[in-house]
Image: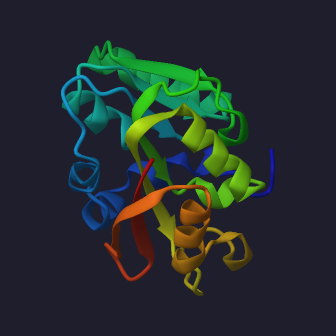
Amino acid sequence: MSERRFDPVKMARLDSPERRKALPPEKILSLLEIKENDTVLDMGAGTGYFSFPAAKLTSGTVYALDVEPQMLEVLKQRIDEQHLKNIDLIEGAIENIPLDNDQVNQIIASFVLHEVELLSKGLQEIWRVLKSGGRCLCLEWEKKPMEQGPPLEHRIHSDDMKKAFEDSGFQIVHFTFPTESHYIIVAQK
């Protein structure tokens, strides 16, 4: 496992009540304006924090991508318990997304782009799998010292992330700070 990747041992943090209060998934997903038949890709899906609410917003497929088989096992159990039929699990990395070109309408990149070894490669892959007019929601840690989150040297400053999206051809359609520690960028292809 790369030192940049999330440790599955800490997966309980992904669904904590504190996280849900500070970053309510339904409210955040509303920024993507997911439509009834949209196909959605949740990158670094983890325990399904965004996959489950996204699956309730569309009858289309929600691809839950994670590089960690252990995370996908937990997610599979939760999908089975909730009897959801429109979430497909995919094992893979953001740097090489195992989907066809122009396949998804919406992408959720929640706390994962700082883990990508080469951000430009990750953004190229997002561009490749996203349909024309599709959107990517990027939720990340701001690059400033704080107790929670990844090491400071792994974080990407919000200005740098915006520039990286723009340099990859995206148009920034929404930018906000839902907390003093986090930022959200919605970028459109």
Residue 93, quarter of picture: top right
| Most foreground residue, 166 or 108 | 166
Color style of the picture: rainbow
Please tell me which residue is depicted at 63% across the width and 68% down the height of the picture.
150
- Whether 164 is drawn above or below 123: the answer is below
Residue 3 image offset from top left, x and y in percent = 80, 56
| Most foreground residue, 183 or 6 | 183
Quarter of the figure that contains the N terminus = top right
Left or right side of 26 for 177: right
Residue 80 image offset from top left, x and y in percent = 37, 15
Residue 77 image offset from top left, x and y in percent = 44, 20
Please tell me which residue is depicted at 61% across the width and 63% down the height of the picture.
167
Q: How many numbered circles does the render carry?
A: 0
Please tell me which residue is depicted at 49% across the width and 56% down the height of the picture.
170
Residue lying farthest to the right in this orientation: 2
Residue lying farthest to the bottom in this orientation: 145
Left or right side of 100 for 138: left
Please tell me which residue is depicted at 60% across the width and 75% down the height of the picture.
160
| Most foreground residue, 42 or 20 | 42
Left or right side of 105 for 88: right
Camera sees residue 56: yes
Left or right side of 153 for 11: left
Residue 88 image offset from top left, x and y in percent = 46, 18
Camera sees residue 46: no
